[in-house]
């Protein structure tokens, strides 16, 4: 079987790695296409090295730009590669512009398309990711869902065929890399941190970063916490912080804030698993917090990972200082943690399903329109 995997942004390298390992182990051929959506070494190269991902055979080097321009540039580059390669399956991951461009290119060429992390919904159409997910799911032949909720979301939109609940490949990656992070990461010593005596924060969503007022409020809230807050800064956020520093330099210098460059995966896992609490607007980090058993405060108005909230390990706090501070001081560690994200074998299940399906299937729209039915 010949697979072409399309990746481009940081979380996709992590989601794709377990599938790459499983494909290689089972003797399948995989070609990786990197769109170039993320390009800094710390946002891209470090993950290929640490996760031992094959070097991309194609790198479109599309880079940053407006949504329309970026997606269009990717679409045109991906189409060219797919037309030549004609793989048995095209794999896309998650919900970024790289995901949507890959899905559109494959479906327009009628190449079999599989979506890993299908069925997630925030029901917030203000998020570019929500459009990317919905559109990608509706043109995929195989939809690999991480959770029961994801399967239900698809059914509500009439997609029932080709849907497989396999678990989450990010969980596969965490299980494999947590022991390595313990062994190899020196980040705790480097930052002079003690387990459970600091908090970890990440912020990169446009609605949190692109408004100086909201970003300022979030920083002020973090600076009111008693413990050190380690904050690896995403390049989008860095750009906005530089702007903010012109008028509010003292805020960035708050004594408990430790602003650092984006980290590699091993260092990030080490910091996540030793933190007392994680505060984040990231999708992947909310999941990882649950996987490593650390309470999470979500700096968004809603989440796709509703199971983590239902289990009591994740609190939706939005940008409200009172809610954030109260949630960060809460400690739900005594609560049970059931296996929401599968058993750590999602990638093997994905490869088994890909192998079993000879060709494409069309998603069946079950919301019938009665007046169009013939007797
Ligand atoms: C993208 C995804 C988002 C995902 C995130 C993961 C979309 C619409 N958004 O958001 O779903 O959660 O990646 O991190 O696909 N930049 C650099 N260096 C880089 C990459 C980006 O400096 O290597 C800067 C550029 O100024 C760029 C900005 O970050 O304009 C935003 O990058 P972009 O890929 O457009 O969106 P993200 O916010 O990273
Ligand atoms: N991550 C990392 N270094 C960092 C920040 C995040 O390795 O400095 C990892 C994190 O552990 C998770 C993934 O990147 O596996 C999440 O990516 P991100 O938050 O950028 O995107 P999202 O999940 O919100 O789409």
Image (cartoon, helix red, strand yellow):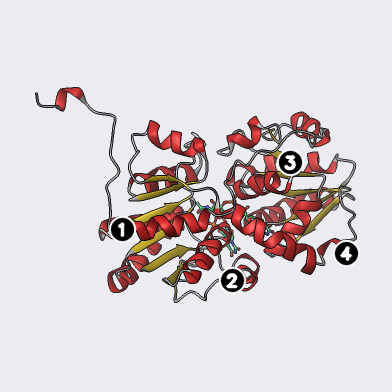
The residue at which mark 1 appears reads as 112
Sequence-wise first label, 3 or 4: 4
In what quadrant of the picture does the C terminus appear? top left
List the residue tagged with mark 2: 48
Residue labelled 4 has its Cβ within 8 Å of some atom of ligand 2: no
CA separation in Å, label 3 and label 4: 27 Å
Asked if residue 100 shows in the view, the reply is no
Q: Quadrant of residue 350?
A: bottom left
Question: Which mark lies nearer to you, 1 or 3?
Answer: 1
**Mark 3 and mark 2: span between their CA atoms?**
32 Å
Q: Earlier in the sequence, mark 4 or mark 1?
A: 1
Of callouts 1 and 2, which one flags the residue occurring earlier in the amino acid sequence? 2
x, y percentage for residue 32? 45, 70
User: Alpha carbon of mark 4 to alpha carbon of mark 1: how far?
Assistant: 47 Å
SS for tag 1? loop
Whole-Å distance between the Cαs marked 1 and 2?
Answer: 26 Å
x and y percentages locating residue 164 in the rendered image: 42, 46
Secondary structure beneath disc 4? helix
Q: As drawn, is 196 to the left or to the right of 374? A: right
The residue beneath circle 3 is 218
Residue 130 lies, with reference to residue 36, above or below; the image says: above
């Amino acid at each position: 079987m010949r697979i072409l995997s399309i990746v481009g942004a940081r979380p996709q390298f992590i989601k794709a790695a377990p599938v790459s390992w499983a494909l290689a182990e089972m003797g399948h051929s995989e070609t990786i296409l990197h769109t170039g959506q993320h390009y800094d070494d710390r946002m891209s190269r470090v993950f290929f090295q640490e996760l031992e991902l094959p070097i991309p055979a194609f790198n479109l080097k599309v880079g940053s730009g407006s949504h329309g321009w970026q997606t269009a540039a990717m679409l045109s580059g991906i189409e060219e590669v797919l037309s030549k390669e004609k793989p048995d399956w095209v794999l896309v991951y998650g919900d970024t512009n790289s995901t949507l461009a890959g899905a559109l290119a494959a479906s327009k060429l009628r190449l079999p398309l599989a979506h890993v992390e299908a069925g997630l919904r925030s029901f917030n159409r203000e998020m570019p990711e929500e459009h990317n997910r919905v559109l990608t799911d509706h043109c995929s032949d195989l939809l690999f869902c991480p959770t029961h909720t994801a399967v239900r979301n698809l059914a509500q939109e009439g997609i029932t065929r080709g849907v497989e609940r396999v678990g989450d490949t990010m969980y596969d990656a965490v299980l494999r890399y947590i022991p390595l992070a313990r062994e190899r990461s020196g980040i705790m010593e480097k930052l002079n941190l003690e387990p459970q005596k600091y908090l970890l924060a990440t912020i990169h969503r446009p609605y949190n970063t692109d408004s100086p007022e909201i970003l300022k409020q979030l920083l002020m809230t973090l600076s009111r916490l008693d413990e050190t807050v380690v904050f690896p800064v995403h390049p989008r956020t860095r750009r906005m912080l530089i702007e903010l520093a012109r008028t509010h330099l003292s805020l960035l210098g708050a004594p408990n804030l430790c602003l650092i460059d984006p980290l590699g995966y091993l260092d990030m896992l080490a910091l996540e698993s030793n933190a007392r609490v994680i505060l984040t607007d990231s999708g992947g980090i909310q999941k990882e917090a649950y996987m490593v058993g650390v309470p999470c405060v979500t700096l968004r108005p809603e989440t796709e990972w509703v199971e983590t909230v239902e289990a009591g390990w994740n609190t939706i706090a939005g940008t409200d200082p009172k809610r954030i501070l109260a949630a960060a001081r809460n400690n739900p560690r005594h609560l049970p943690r059931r296996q929401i994200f599968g058993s750590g074998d999602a990638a093997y299940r994905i490869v088994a399903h890909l192998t079993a399906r000879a060709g494409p299937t069309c998603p069946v729209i079950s919301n019938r329109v009665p007046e169009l039915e013939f007797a």
